[in-house]
Amino acid sequence: MRAKYGNSVVEIWKIDSQNIDEDWVKQAFEDQIIWWNMSDKKILMVNNTGSALTGILPKMKITGLSVSMGGTGWYLIKSSDNIYKVIDEKHFKKEYSLF
C-alpha cells in the first residue's frame, strides 16, 4: 500500500505476521532489514540504517546497530530513499493519508 506523508509518497504495511503480501516487505525480510523478534513473533525489528544485514542475523552483537521495534497493528513505513521506520496507529492516522 501507499500513503502520502507531507509532500512525499511512502510504502506502508500494517504489521501482521499472518499477512505478508507486499513484495517490498518480503524483500526487506530477505535482506534482513526487518525481522521478527526471536522471543516474541508479534514484534517486528527494524534496522534503522536500511542497509542489508544478510548473513549477520541472528547475531545481535553489532556495534552501532540502530534498531526500532513495532508490534502487530503498527505500521512499517518505507520512504522513497529506502529509510524504514515503524509508527503506531494513532500517529499513522494523524500524519499519513492512504491513497
Image: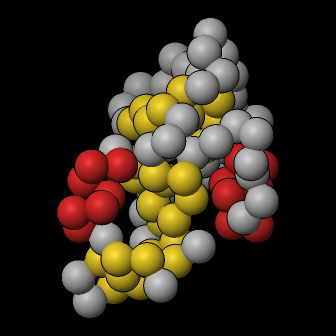
Residue ID at (51%, 65%): 12
Q: Nearer the viewer, residue 18 or 52?
A: 18
Q: What residue sits 41% from the left and 26% below the top?
A: 63
Q: Position of residue 65 (x, y in %)?
A: 42, 34
In screen coordinates, is 96 left or right of 76?
A: left
Q: Position of residue 93 (x, y in %)?
A: 30, 61
> Which color scheme is applied?
secondary structure
Residue 10 image position (x, y, % from top left) = 45, 76
Kindly tell me whether residue 69 is visible in this rendering: yes
Residue found farthest to the top:
39
Q: Nearer the viewer, residue 21 or 36?
A: 21
On screen, residue 88 versus residue 74, left or right, reads left
x, y percent for residue 8: 33, 85
In the depicted structure, whether residue 86 falls above or below residue 57: below
**Residue 35 position by quadrant:** top right
34 lies above or below 28: above
Q: Residue at x 70, y 37 (%)?
A: 17
The image shows a total of numbered marks equal to: 0
Residue at 62%, 10% in the rendered image: 39
Tell me if I can see residue 80 in this picture.
no
Quadrant of the snapshot with the N terminus: bottom right
